[in-house]
Image (cartoon, rainbow, N blue to C red):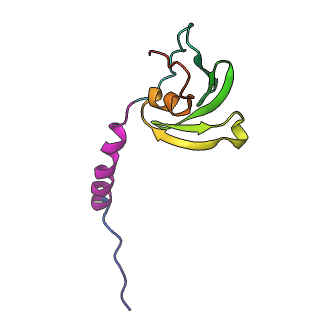
Amino acid sequence: MVLERPSSPARRGALRSRAVPGLHELPPRRPQPPAPDDSTVRWERIDIDRYEVRASGVTVGFIDVVGAVFVVLAGPRYDRAVEALQTLDFAVAVDAITPADTERPIA
């Protein structure tokens, strides 16, 4: 019978320390400032980690904040919205669900 010896705590710590620095390199997430008042594309924070995006007063999608990633959901209803994109840039997330014929806000 061959018994495997568990790895030493030092080895486990070394493996863990190689993975952790990547998490610290991701940008911190803070609430996004509101869209300019004269913009046809607007977003509103509707939950601690969710934004609703409207174009010309109509809901076009949602943006969920998952860690450092913005998950873009396209559709007027959250329960039926379809994931369209994952990005680290909020402006890219808004552009992904904004109709092509709508003026984009300058942020």
**Residue 92: quadrant of the picture:** top left
Magenta span of residues: 10-27
Residue 90 coordinates in the image, percent (x, y): 47, 28
On the image, which quarter does residue 8 sit in?
bottom left
Residue 104 in percent (x, y) is at 50, 20
Among the 4 quarters of the image, the one containing residue 47: top right
Q: At 56% across and 32% down in the image, what residue appears? A: 97
Q: In this rendering, would 107 be left or right of 50? A: left
Q: Main secondary structure of the magenta part?
A: helix
Magenta segment: does it hold 69?
A: no
Is 62 located above or below residue 19 in the figure? Answer: above
In front of the other: 6 or 97? 97
* Depicted 47 relative to depicted 38: above or below: below
Residue 58 in percent (x, y) is at: 69, 23
The correct choice, above or below, for 25 with respect to 48 in the image is below
Q: Of all residues shown, which one is farthest toward the top?
A: 37
> For the point 53% across and 28% down, which residue is it?
100
